[in-house]
Amino acid sequence: MLAANPGRELRRGPRRDILKGPGLRASVAMADTATTASAAAASAASAATDAPPFQLGKPRFQQTSFYGRFRHFLDIIDPRTLFVTERRLREAVQLLEDYKHGTLRPGVTNEQLWSAQKIKQAILHPDTNEKIFMPFRMSGYIPFGTPIVVGLLLPNQTLASTVFWQWLNQSHNACVNYANRNATKPSPASKFIQGYLGAVISAVSIAVGLNVLVQKANKFTPATRLLVQRFVPFPAVASANICNVVLMRYGELEEGIDVMDGDGNLVGSSRIAARHALLETALTRVVLPMPILVLPPIVMSMLEKTALLQARPRLLLPVQSLVCLAAFGLALPLAISLFPQMSEDLLEHLDEVRTGQEEARLCEAPAEEIESIGIAKCVAL
């Protein structure tokens, strides 16, 4: 729940991280005659609208800016797609197939095509075309994850409740990661199990250890001890997230990750790009739970002093749930929009002298050579 970087990791790792996200990894349509005809028809029908020209398998919003990525991920996590009917899903899939084969009926707009692609990507796995179980879709991340956040932040937790909520959180993360994995490059189940066990053990041990230390801190007043305990879930979850990333993707540091040229052709691999991808994924996984697990305790500590909640203590849990929902809904798209899903490494001094085939040869060089001279116009997956 508090670990998915539905964007970064699903694209680069063995799983489907969010730009290839729940469907975002759909194959890029070839600019053949049929597709061009469909695109022309859709553009003509959409001349009066603000929708950009439709591109099959491509994000609707520009991914070079933070705002574009933010808009893109708002679409990805839109919970309204959870209520799409089976009939509407079939219609969306058929519409995209018609576009792909150049048989699009007259009058279909770009807006309708973008909407159809959004529905398909939200529900169907891009590699298997099978429906993703609702709680493990990215559009279900906030609705199904918020109760876990509320549980993590409950005051006066016992040892058993602490272990339970940390375990449930990491189990939810594991299920989301597996459901959105990259099925074109199957990973052994042992790797997922290793990452899951490492995350659970680290989260539980850190949460329990910190709670014990706080309980034994005699200098804290009861009120201060309660406040400090509310912040314990953050370091536990953040540490578990980093542990999960390292265990799942440490092999990339040795093997490197794929790099592509400007046309999207696979030309080699790079360990330098792997380090960048791993660092950015880990950073996102630390940033994501920060507002979710830090802001609600601060807000609740102030709201609990109001006359309304002091007179009606039964409202504490509903109010805390709303605060957690708001923090989760804001933090998720912001955190996963921090970095572009496709990173470009440009070395200007190399770009000036290495173009065309020389540039491709550079990308095909051994990892050691790439690391010593850099990557010229190579795009890291």
Image (cartoon, rainbow, N blue to C red):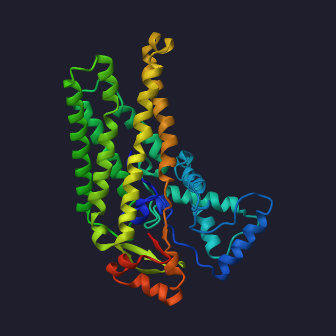
Q: Which residue appears at 48% of the width and 88% of the height?
A: 358
Q: Which residue appears at 29% of the width and 39% of the height?
A: 166
Residue 122 picture location, percent across and down: 51, 55
Which residue lies most toward the bottom here?
357
Total numbered labels placed on residues in the image: 0
Quadrant into which the C terminus falls = bottom left
Residue 194 picture location, percent across and down: 23, 57
Q: Which of 372 and 168 is in front in this view?
A: 372
Taking the image as shown, residue 296 lies to the left or right of residue 121, namely left
Taking the image as shown, residue 216 lies to the left or right of residue 246, namely left
Q: Quadrant of residue 14?
A: bottom left
Q: Is residue 4 something that shows in the picture?
A: no
Q: Which residue appears at 50% of the width and 56% of the height?
A: 123
Q: Quadrant of residue 107?
A: bottom right
Residue 42 picture location, percent across and down: 73, 67
Quadrant into which the N terminus falls = top left
Q: Is residue 76 something that shows in the picture?
A: yes
Residue 32 picture location, percent across and down: 63, 81
Q: Which of 77 and 100 is in front in this view?
A: 77
Q: Which residue appears at 68% of the width and 77% of the height?
A: 36
